Amino acid sequence: MFFPDLSKTYSAMFLKALLAFLLLPGIFAGILPLYLGLSDPSSHSGSLLGILPIVLGLILLLWCVRDFYVSGKGTLAPWHPPINLVSTGLYRFTRNPMYLAVLTIILGQALLFESTRVLVYLLGIAIAFHLRVLLNEEHWLKTQFGHEWEQYKSSAPRWLPRLTPFFLHKRSTIREKN
């Protein structure tokens, strides 16, 4: 055949995105804080207000995963990263909305369980995310996307979201003939 079967390509990428979602946020924002909250002897009945940040974080996380899949043509997993710089959706407000979504989910569990262990875990994960961004991801993004990354980096804050969205103006790769 002259044309590749794109349905197989997209199906494989969707399965990779689903697996990455279940493994990474599923473990770090789901299973581990849940275990810590349930096993914390200082934990109390908790506050149902914790459900609000959990639901908000899940919505934000799914939005980010979708943007990685649709705009970035990749997944959140380091073994299958996006091939395009993702600067749409929540990424117009901050460079790391996915990490913020995960932290929001963990915060919700800390509130739900009123757990000191989950709060300490939240702090540890926040530090780990910050170090990963500084020591690994930003260098990779600069290497991978060059000028496009530099433009995005100078306009979208690393952590605290902007109040107005940023729109990346991509350079045209088509050169006009004189």
Image (tube, rainbow, N blue to C red):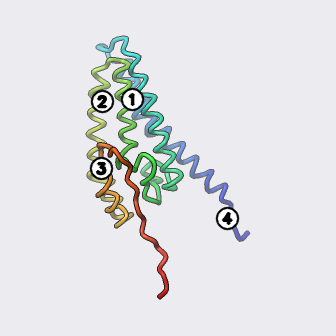
Amino acid type of the residue that numbered disc 1 sits on in the rendered structure:
Leu
- Looking at the image, is mark 4 or mark 2 earlier in the sequence? 4
Instruction: Check disc 3 and report the residue beneath it.
Output: 157
C-alpha gap between disc 4 and disc 1: 41 Å
Q: Which mark is residue 121?
A: 2
- Residue 86: x and y in percent read 44, 54
C-alpha gap between disc 1 and disc 3: 29 Å
Task: Examine the rendered structure and indicate whether residue 122 appears above or below residue 7.
Answer: above
Q: Nearer the viewer, mark 3 or mark 2?
A: 3
- Looking at the image, is mark 3 or mark 2 earlier in the sequence? 2
C-alpha gap between disc 4 and disc 2: 46 Å
Task: Examine the rendered structure and indicate whether residue 96 appears above or below residue 38.
Answer: below
Q: Are marks 4 and 3 in contact (CB under 8 Å)?
A: no
Q: Residue at x 34, y 64 (%)?
A: 143
C-alpha gap between disc 4 and disc 3: 40 Å
SS class of the residue under badge 3? loop
Q: Are marks 1 and 2 in contact (CB under 8 Å)?
A: yes
Amino acid type of the residue that numbered disc 4 sits on in the rendered structure:
Pro
Q: Residue at x 39, y 37 (%)?
A: 101
